[in-house]
Image (spheres, helix red, strand yellow):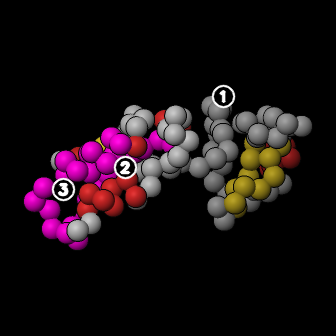
Amino acid sequence: MFTADSLKPYAEAVAVKDNRIMPVGSDKQIRKFTDPSATRVIEAAAALLIPGFNDAHAHFGPVDPDYIELRYVTDPAVITEKGRNRRPGRRRASLIYGGHWEHEMFTHTREWPAKELIDAVFTG
């Protein structure tokens, strides 16, 4: 098991109680945290156990034909233009979804996209 502890980067065993990681160490050290009548022991053999969490989610916005995809956009003017292309026939207060812009892509302006880029398109 990888521990992410620079002093003890690997261990043989870990105890978990009430969804909390208890001490890690050798099989012998961890056995004192087990109760043969109540403890479920999982023998992972040579498998690697890594501390962390699993974030399983999805972004369904791009499936919507009205979604404004902004991935790989590097020019703020393109955001305004994409908004303008969605404007025809929309009610004033209608909601338009968009996203996936990456702030690292805006290197020439050093400014992140802001609502002002589309305010002029959707007001009035």
Specify start and end residues of the magenta stretch as a single range. 77-103
Q: Position of residue 87 (x, y in %)?
A: 18, 56
Q: Is residue 54 above or below residue 108?
A: below
In the structure shown, which secondary structural element does the residue marked by tag 1 occupy?
Answer: loop
Q: Single out the residue that lies furthest toward the right.
A: 7
The CA distance from mark 1 to mark 3 is 58 Å
Q: Does residue 74 appear to the left or right of 20 in the view shown?
A: left
Q: Does residue 43 appear to the left or right of 65 in the view shown?
A: right
The 10 Å Cα crowd at callout 3, few under 14, some 14 to 19, many 20 or more, is some
Mark linked to residue 46: 1
Where does label 2 land, which residue? Answer: 99
Q: Residue at x 44, y 55 (%)?
A: 114
Q: Position of residue 69 (x, y in %)?
A: 31, 43
The CA distance from mark 2 to mark 1 is 42 Å
Q: Residue at x 33, y 61 (%)?
A: 119
Q: Are marks 2 and 1 in contact (CB under 8 Å)?
A: no
Mark linked to residue 87: 3
Q: Is residue 101 above or below residue 32?
A: above
| Residue 5 highlighted magenta (yes or no) | no
Instruction: Tell me which amino acid carries mark 3.
Output: Arg
Q: Quadrant of the C terminus?
A: bottom left
Q: Nearer the viewer, residue 59 or 38?
A: 59
| Residue 87 highlighted magenta (yes or no) | yes
The answer to which of marks 2 and 1 sits earlier in the sequence is: 1
Q: Is residue 39 visible?
A: yes
- Marker count (numbered): 3
